[in-house]
């Protein structure tokens, strides 16, 4: 267990103190991972001022969570009593009879009266129950806390980038073999897993030909058997922190117009990165990239925001988009991913990750933006 995760939990406790709360109930998997370093945690983490910190899980997951949870977090399993012989093989003192709602109520009854929760991440039944308990929604404040990364978090993101770039390199080597989109996706995934990744940070997009014009696409059975455009949007989850990149290239001879579009998109990306620094609002770099496309008369084909934060989730604050008024700060890690999409023809997207330092943005992805 990386001891630095305890520092994240302290940030949540600091937020609890700032809001004058007795406890914070975390229901989102990403927020529990952020606070503990647990992979695929279940179900609820209760961080408290007057009680120990509790991880409340199902009896089914008790032993898996027990093996992964920080030593200063107490595991409790909720279990609905059934017929004789259904009692789980768990120490009786660690079992709370009833469902998850009864278990939450029992634990909170000993810890104070004023609670906060990440309601934006809550599934409906739990969120509804917490609202009925009168919890304060701290989702926005928690997202702000997570947006600013410590140096060890950036190091894990860079480790994720390194794994995904190696997987991309191996995937690109397949292109001469006339693969399907799905086969390239499979190669990328197997490379990540062989490197010890927790998995992909999102389902990898591999698109050939006119499918590159679809910003969100599921790889299919299309075969790369003639010259044409290729787009790969990819990332790794390495020890809980994510990466997110995209590369576009022309496979085979020809492609002069497509290659020219790649250069235009790369220019738009560079203009945005050059302008990123602490203190500017999130719409400013987005606008810088749009000016390049406006000059070329193709702005209407850029139909999404410029980028987003990345951390224990693939989409985090801040969001770089038109009218985005969030102020960028030192410690944030964001993507910069302008794209142009001509429906039925092809699309180009180039995406890199940058870390905002005291003065400017430092590119932390390394793979060449122009692939020949």
Image: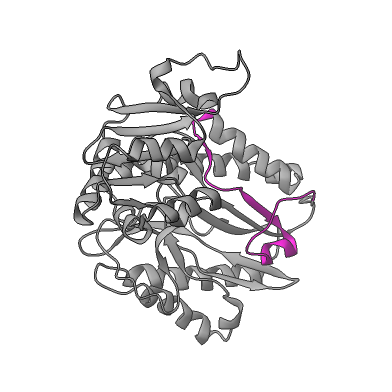
Span highlighted in magenta in the image: 194-221
Q: Nearer the viewer, residue 198 or 224?
A: 198
Q: Residue 270 lies in what quarter of the image?
A: bottom left
Q: Report the coloring of the rendering.
A: one colour
Q: Is residue 211 magenta?
A: yes
Left or right of 49 on screen, residue 102: right
**At which x and y percent is residue 31?**
40, 46
**At which x and y percent is residue 364?**
36, 52
Q: Nearer the viewer, residue 227 or 72?
A: 72
Residue 76 versus residue 179 in the image, above or below: above
How many numbered marks are there? 0
**At which x and y percent is residue 274?**
33, 70
Name the residue located 40 percent from the left edge and 40 percent from the top edge: 105
Quarter of the image with the C terminus in it: bottom right
Whether residue 288 is visible: yes
Left or right of 35 on screen, residue 44: right
Q: Is residue 83 magenta?
A: no
**At which x and y percent is residue 64?**
48, 23
Whether residue 314 is visible: no
Name the residue located 33 percent from the left edge and 27 percent from the top edge: 74
Name the residue located 70 percent from the left edge and 53 percent from the top edge: 218
Quarter of the image with the N terminus in it: top left
Residue 348 versus residue 206 in the image, above or below: below
């Amino acid at each position: 267990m990386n001891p630095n995760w305890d520092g994240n939990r302290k940030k949540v406790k600091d937020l609890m103190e700032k809001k004058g709360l007795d406890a914070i109930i975390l229901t989102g998997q990403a927020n529990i991972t952020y606070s503990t370093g647990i992979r695929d945690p279940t179900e609820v983490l209760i961080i408290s001022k007057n009680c120990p910190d509790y991880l409340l899980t199902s009896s089914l997951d008790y032993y898996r969570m027990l093996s992964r949870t920080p030593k200063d977090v107490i595991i409790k399993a909720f279990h609905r009593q059934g017929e004789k012989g259904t009692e789980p093989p768990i120490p009786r003192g660690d079992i709370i009879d009833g469902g998850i709602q009864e278990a939450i109520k029992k634990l909170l009854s000993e810890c104070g009266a004023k609670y906060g929760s990440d309601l934006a991440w809550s599934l409906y039944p739990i969120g509804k129950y917490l609202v009925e308990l009168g919890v304060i929604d701290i989702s926005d404040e928690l997202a702000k806390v997570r947006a600013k990364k410590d140096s060890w978090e950036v190091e894990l993101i860079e480790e994720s980038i390194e794994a995904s770039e190696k997987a991309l390199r191996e995937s690109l080597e397949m292109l001469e073999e006339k693969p399907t989109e799905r086969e390239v996706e499979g190669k990328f995934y197997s490379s990540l897993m062989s490197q010890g990744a927790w998995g992909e940070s999102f389902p990898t997009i591999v698109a050939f030909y006119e499918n590159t014009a679809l910003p969100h696409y599921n790889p299919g059975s299309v075969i790369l058997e003639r010259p044409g455009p290729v787009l790969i949007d990819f990332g790794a989850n390495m020890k809980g922190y994510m990466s997110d990149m995209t590369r576009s290239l022309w496979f085979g001879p020809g492609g002069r117009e497509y290659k020219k579009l790649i250069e235009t998109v790369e220019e738009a990306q560079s203009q945005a990165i050059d302008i990123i620094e602490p203190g500017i609002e999130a719409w400013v770099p987005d606008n810088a990239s749009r000016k390049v496309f406006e000059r070329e008369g193709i702005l209407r084909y850029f139909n999404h925001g410029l980028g987003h934060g990345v951390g224990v989730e693939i989409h985090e604050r801040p969001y770089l988009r038109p009218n985005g008024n969030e102020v960028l700060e030192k410690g944030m890690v964001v993507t910069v991913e302008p794209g142009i999409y001509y429906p039925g023809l092809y699309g180009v997207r180039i995406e890199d990750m940058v870390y905002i330092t005291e003065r400017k943005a430092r590119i932390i992805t390394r793979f060449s933006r122009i692939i020949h």
